[in-house]
Image (cartoon, rainbow, N blue to C red):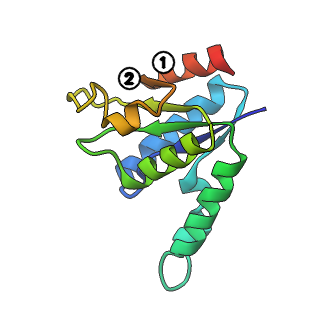
Amino acid sequence: MTSIYFAAPLFTAAERAWNADCAEQLRAALSATILVPQEFCAPCDQAEGGPDFGGIFTACVEHLDRCSHVLAVLDGADPDSGTCWEAGYAYAKGLPVIGLRTDWRPAEDGSANCMLSRSCASVVTDLAAAIAWFHQHS
């Protein structure tokens, strides 16, 4: 079964709301397990005494090791550093990485830094195109 790790920034209320909406759309459109760090890391985020960063790292790596694909949000002048690490880790493991760049500003290699854009199997500009890619390649 296809399992998609949704790599995206998750530090603001707006980012978390957008991620949750994207996850809901992906789940409705695909016969796949959608792995969303803000969901599976919630216990670590709310640990007594502050976030458990070691737990967050471990949970993310464990979920990356279980997934078959990564959907990485590449928005911003410089995409989120955690997302970049997750995309690089997936690429090194030979997993297909789909870049999602909804940001219309031009970037270094057209859609992102060349190290990101060239490690992606595809870079798409909206969630519908990502869903279409998964339907075609899964």
From the viewer's perspective, is residue 17 above or below residue 119? below
Within the image, what quadrant is residue 60 found in? bottom right
In the image, taking residue 124 as reference, residue 45 lies left or right, namely: right
Instruction: Report whether residue 46 is seen.
Output: no
Q: Check the image and name the residue furthest to the right.
A: 1
Residue at x 64%, y 32% (from the top left corner): 27
Tell which of 27 and 32 is nearer to you: 32
Q: Secondary structure at mark 1?
A: helix
Q: Quadrant of the N terminus?
A: top right
The amino acid type, in three-letter code, at marker 2 is: Thr
Residue at x 41%, y 50% (from the top left corner): 9
From the viewer's perspective, is residue 125 above or below residue 10? above
Q: Quadrant of the C terminus?
A: top right
Residue at x 51%, y 73% (from the top left corner): 53
Give the image location of residue 135, x and y in percent.
Answer: 64, 17
The residue that mark 2 highlights is 125
Q: Secondary structure at mark 2?
A: loop
Instruction: Report whether residue 109 is seen.
Output: yes
From the viewer's perspective, is residue 104 above or below residue 82? above
Give the image location of residue 14, x and y in percent.
Answer: 36, 48
Give the image location of residue 47, x and y in percent.
Answer: 56, 78
Whether label 1 touches label 2, CB < 8 Å = yes
**Residue 76: mark in rendering:** none
Within the image, what quadrant is residue 79 found in? top left
Instruction: Tell me the distance, in whole angstroms, between the alpha carbons under discs 1 and 2.
Output: 7 Å
- Binning the other alpha carbons within 10 Å of mark 1 as few (below 14), some (14 to 19) or many (20 upward) gives few
The amino acid type, in three-letter code, at marker 1 is: Ala
In the image, taking residue 4 as reference, residue 1 lies left or right, namely: right
The residue that mark 1 highlights is 129
